Each structure stands twice: as C-alpha cells, then as structure tokens.
Amino acid sequence: MRLAVLALALALATATVSEAADDPVLKAATDLTGDVMFLESGAPGMVLVVVRGDQVLIRGYGETEKGNGIKPDGASLVRLNSITKVLTTEVLVSLAAERKLALTDRLQRFAEVRLPVFNDRAITLLDLATHSAALPREMGSAPDGANPRAWPTYTDRWTWLPGYQLPWEPGTIASYSNVGFDLLADAIGKAGGRSYPDLLRSQVTERLGMTDTGFAPTQEQCGRLMIGSGLGGPATCVDTQATGGSGGLYSTGNDMARWLRHNLDTGNPALALSHAVYRPRQAMQATIGFDEAAPMAGLGLGWVAVAARSIEPMLLVKSGGGAGFMSYVALAPGRDVGVFVVVNRADFAMFSGLTDAANKLIASLVTR
C-alpha cells in the first residue's frame, strides 16, 4: 500500500512539472530526485534549477500557492532570503577589483558616527563578509506589523551600531549575522557613490540579464510571486531594499540559472575573490550557525565551503529561510555543476533533507 501511494504521489508530482533542457543527462538525474525532493519538502510548490556546463534544466513542481492550481516555472518570482548575501559579496569584489574599496578597509571609513571596537581592533569589510565582525544575528525583534524583509532600515541600524558593545574581537569567532551584511551593503553604496540597489543592478544583474532580480518588484512581478507558507509566511510583496545586503532579493529560476552559469566561470578573477576561503574553521575560536546544509569547512565571502566527503565533491553553498520560503544554492567549483532549489514553505526541520538531496544530485553529475 505504501508503495502504491508513493507511486501515485510521484505521478501527480511529475504531472505538474514544467522543464526546459536539451541535456538528457540532466533530465535523467532529476526525474526521480526532483520529485522526491518536492514531496518530502511538504511545500505547496518548488522550483529546481540544475546547471551542467552549458546545459540548464528548470523544473517547477506543485502550485505557486496552496490550492490555486497554478504550477511554478522559471518565471515564477521567489524570495532568495539569505542567498542574497552572496550577491552582495559579488558587488563587494567587483568594487575591490575597481579599487574603490579594499576588503581590509575598516567599516569606520564609510561611517558618519564613531563605531565600536574591541581592544583597538575595528570591524573590517572582510569581517562583515565572513560573519566574523562580532555582531549579533539580528538587532532585535521587528516592530509589530513590520514586513520581515523591510526592517531594520538604514537609519535603524546606524542609530543602533554606535551603542553596541562588541562581545569579542572581530576576526576571531564566526557567528552568523544578518545585520552585518546590511551594514556591508551600506558601506558598498558609500564606496561606489550610488545606492546599493543601483550598484547591484549595474555590477551584476543587468550585466547578466537578470531582469526579475531586485528589491522593488512591479505589480506584474508581484503577480508572479509564489506565496509563502509555514514559518514567517506569507509576507506581502513590498520593496525590501532595507535588507538589501542580507535577505531582501526577489528572483526567478530563469535568473538564477544565468547567475549559476556565471558563477561556474573559473576564468573570472573577481569571482575567485568571493569564492576563496578567508576563515578556515580550524582557525576560528568558534563557528556558530553554518552547518545546516553540511558541515562547514571554511567561510568565503558570504559562501560556506564544504569539504569533499565520500562521493560528494568540495562545494560552495548558501542557504536561506524566512518569509514563507526556504532556498539553497550549491556549486562544485571547477566541475561546472550547480543547483538552486526553492520551496514556498519555511520549515527548518525539513530543510536538511532538501539540502542533502541537492548535494547528492550534484555528486551524481560529478564523477571525476
């Protein structure tokens, strides 16, 4: 009976799939794996993107909102949540390549108020980009009724930071921080002489043709937004540039396919900067909040490095959760394979299964 039920469920899931791929290998690799990932997520819907060299597969499963009968596809708008951070660091390294800033710059350079230090050790941009600036995960609880991706504002965080007491020396402990990445985006804006959203557009999304990736979706784009469920969802479709550095980005499967292919370009020197490991795990006194997808071996700029193990290659990964969505991206550097998956259900208990399946999907496509 259980096998019959599973077979029926798989058939129903497959019936809701839309795909675009010429590579029969990608199709074979995802036929069963994608169905199982979706069913075990318990989400109303899922979008899966797999890139292998020049080949791309994009599949949608289930519904954009529970009960609406509309299946997601590559044009469905989704929330990236904390995957936003690795696009922030891409802007960071692009400005570093133009010598408009240096990773070793103190945050104080871009501030109009005096910032906290610990034993004369100041926060640097590298500290912010590797979660090692001795800052908390959040400033505190959002005000009642605040959109989860539209708070804290620029004014909120720069009013708060001068009075915050660093609990340890920056650069010695890695502890996940959302507010740190929003401060990083603020500094990037100052260095680039433009608003951070404008810099993201000019340095990354516009160059790659990522027309649906940004912080201020139009009415038409909001009409394509998958509706979140579970923890923190659904959230209204509003301007989220307040958290532009940490988690505010909207995107689509189509755009993320372009971005994945771009990140697999081993000849791009700026990407080599963001993919490098700056904080090896063993060099830190503690590492807090980085093992939800797999054991963290070290931290790049926003990226979490995962060591090769068993059949799985070395990976760069980033996960995101909140506002009714869970998202995950993983790359196998030098192997031309990457995966992006997002579900419109925020549930941290199920997430490890989803990320493990994505990692194993990459392993099935990397055999050398």
Image (tube, rainbow, N blue to C red):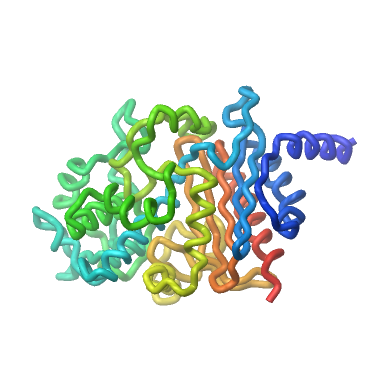
Residue 219 sits above or below residue 60 on the image: above
Residue 107 sits above or below residue 213 on the image: below
Between 209 and 249, the one nearer to me in the picture: 209
Question: Is residue 329 rendered to the left or right of residue 22?
Answer: left
Quadrant of the rendering where the N terminus is positioned? top right
Report x, y in % for residue 275: 43, 69
Quadrant of the rendering where the C terminus is positioned? bottom right
Whether residue 228 is visible, yes or no, is no
Whether residue 348 is visible, yes or no, is yes
Question: Is residue 123 rendered to the left or right of residue 24?
Answer: left
Question: Is residue 108 rendered to the left or right of residue 331?
Answer: left
On the image, which quarter does residue 213 sit in?
top left
Could you tell me which residue is drawn at 63 percent across and 23 percent down?
Answer: 67
Report x, y in % for residue 125: 26, 64
Report x, y in % for residue 68: 61, 23
Could you tell me which residue is drawn at 27 percent across and 48 percent down?
Answer: 198
Residue 79 sits above or below residue 317 on the image: above
Report x, y in % for residue 139: 28, 45
Between 171 and 327, the one nearer to me in the picture: 327
